[in-house]
Amino acid sequence: MEIPSRLIETAVDQMASLPGVGRKTALRLVLHLLGRTEEQVASFSEAFMQMKSGIHACTECHNLTESAVCSICSDVTRLRDSICVVEDIRDLLALEATGQYRGKYHVLGGVISPMDGIGPNDLHIGTLVERLTGMDTSTEQVEVIFALPATMEGETTAFYLFRKLAPLNVRVTAIARGLAVGEDLQHADEATLVQSLRQRLPYTT
């Protein structure tokens, strides 16, 4: 498809760089924006610029937030002795949508994947250990829930974490495998996630 404008071509290239957006869809979106007023396009662009500059990782759990600490970590009604470990923000949002979990989270920022060059040091594992080390596990039973993908990479990450947390006095569990092997949390239906949370089991290697 030949586009008769270098400016439109550049805009289409940028739009098509988004995941799941092909060039035909990108062209349709660009032409739609072209039909909007300058004020509307400026507001559209400004919203993304403000998001990029104003959003950062929570200093405690690595969730996305506008403040130093996210709304979940700062919520005093949440259970502080329960930490659910997830791969990324989408998994956190999927679990929160069930309304069944009232503890806190820790976002790893990925899973261990040697094929992709991702090792333990590339993930937020050190800060998880620091969080748990800073808790008084002698007086309270702290539970760490592995809510990681049912994939080889997810299992590898869970095994590494289990060994890493072994010296700490914490109870390690994993969500029940109501999820299909190879399925990401954000693609599971709500009922499956609820059952997986309710039927979590002690983590074993």
Image (tube, rainbow, N blue to C red):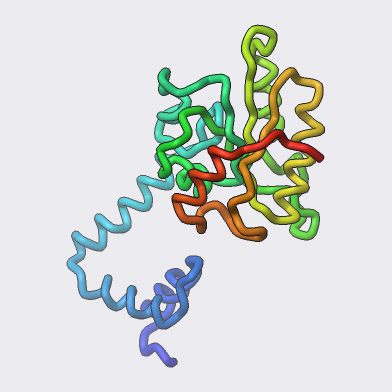
Q: Quadrant of residue 23?
A: bottom left
Q: Nearer the viewer, residue 138 or 134?
A: 138
Q: Is residue 91 left or right of residue 145?
A: left
Residue 165 point in image, percent of width and height: 76, 27
Q: Is residue 13 above or below residue 127?
A: below
Q: Quadrant of residue 168?
A: top right
Quadrant holding the N terminus? bottom left
| Residue 111 pos. (x, y %) | 69, 48
Q: Quadrant of residue 157?
A: top right
| Most foreground residue, 75 or 169 | 169
Q: Is residue 27 left or right of residue 151?
A: left
The image position of residue 97, as x and y in percent, is 41, 44
Judged from this view, the residue extending furthest toward the bottom is 2
Give the number of marks: 0
Q: Quadrant of the C terminus?
A: top right
Residue displayed at 39% across by 88% down? 3
Q: Is residue 71 above or below residue 134?
A: below
Q: Residue at x 69, y 25 (%)?
A: 171
Q: Residue at x 56, y 46 (%)?
A: 88
Q: Residue at x 70, y 30 (%)?
A: 172
The spot of residue 5 in percent (x, y) is 37, 85
